[in-house]
Image: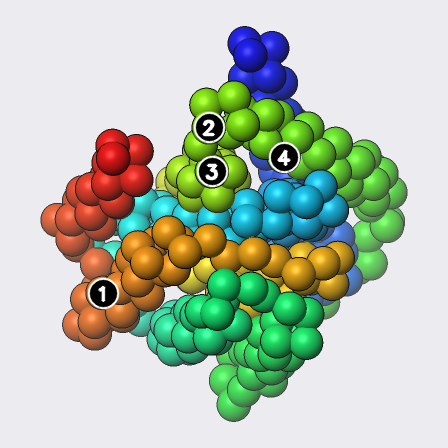
Amino acid sequence: MLTQVLIFVVAIAILLISAQFFTSAAEQIGKYFKMPSFVVGVFIVGIGTSLPELVSSILAVQQSVSEIVPGNVMGSNISNVLLITGLVAVFNRKEIKLTQSYIFIHLHYLIGAFFIFTIIAFDGEIIWYEAIVGLLAFIIYSLYLIHDDRKEHLLDEIKTHKKDPFPVKQALIILACSFGIYLGADYTISSLSFIAGHFQIAPSVIALTVLSIGTTLPELAVNITAIRQGKAEMAVGNVLGSSIFNSLVVPAIASFFGSIAVPDHLLAFSLPVMIGSGLFFYLLTHDKRISPWEGSLFVFIYTLFILKIAVP
């Protein structure tokens, strides 16, 4: 048993470190191709930090423990919206002013993404032809962000300096980290399944708590860096973008490998908490700011959620 716990810890460490290096290398390649910093920040960083959820979900379906997928999605979204955003506000130590209009596009799509996930999961099973709606919605969301009527402001960020050599080192890092992400996710899921069976705990519960907290660590690391650089608002945008990706893309791609079971206990408690956290965040940010006190409230609510799950 101790061996499996050690494997889980090492595997999730490999998964997270690989995702971090993958994201950094992808950022450099994005800059090489003169992509606007907005696109690099929201899409490359947002999607890169969600790779642990995506790969672990695919492998969970392949290993016949598909209930891990909705547990991981719900747990990651709840920890993103409540824990990560709360810590960002607390660590920033002053109000985060939401002035960029794209933040509110995120907010609207966040509610829509949670609604779509609720519809496809509510009958206790996610099938590919249902989940593909989420994938299409994410594509529309991406195109809308890039091509809306504010694109002139984004295009101003493109640099026109002399062409640099292609970052071969970063390309090799991406290849190596892709293997690391796969390997880490594979051992994470297999060890998690063993631990759940040993303690007679549903795999979805462990995914909802331990795995979801572990796979959101890249978001926390990226956002702490953003805070130190005075970009707390971008940190909030990255969290919301990651939650939208988790809700729309992760179940869609995972469902291509087999149907996904959604246990009743997730539908009864965790799904309402996820929806409630999204609505609470949406209402709380109508004054276009997040104070450290509000961030503390987010963290306390998340703590209550974990205690409710962990203590029967």
Viewer-side label of 4, 2: 2
State how far apart marks 2 and 3 are (Cα): 7 Å
Q: Amino acid at mark 2?
A: Gln
Up the image or down, 91 lies above or below 123; here it is above
Q: Is residue 171 left or right of residue 104?
A: right
Residue 134, visible in the rendered structure: yes
CB contact under 8 Å: marks 2 and 3: no
Residue hosting label 4: 189
Relative to residue 77, is residue 129 depicted above or below? below
Q: Tell me if residue 169 comes above or below residue 295 in the rendering.
A: above
Residue 101 or residue 262, whichever sits in front: 262
Residue on which the image places disc 1: 280
Categorize mark 1 by other alpha carbons within 10 Å: few (<14), some (14-19), many (20+).
some
Of tags 4 and 3, the one toward the viewer is 3
Residue at the spot 71% in from the left edge and 34% down from the top edge:
186
Please provide percent x and percent y for residue 154. 55, 75
Name the residue carrying label 2: 200
Mark 4 vs 2, N-terminal side: 4
Please state, as top left, top right, bottom left or bottom right, where the C terminus lies in the image. Answer: top left
Q: Secondary structure at mark 4?
A: helix
Q: Find disc 3 in the rendering and name its residue.
A: 202
Q: Mark 2 or mark 1, which is nearer the start of the sequence?
A: 2
Q: CA distance from mark 1 to mark 3?
A: 28 Å
Disc 1, SS: helix
Q: Nearer the viewer, mark 1 or mark 2?
A: 2
The alpha-carbon separation of the residues under discs 4 and 1 comes to 32 Å
Q: Quadrant of residue 280?
A: bottom left
Residue displayed at 47% across by 38% down: 202
Question: Residue flagged by tag 1: what amino acid is it?
Answer: Phe
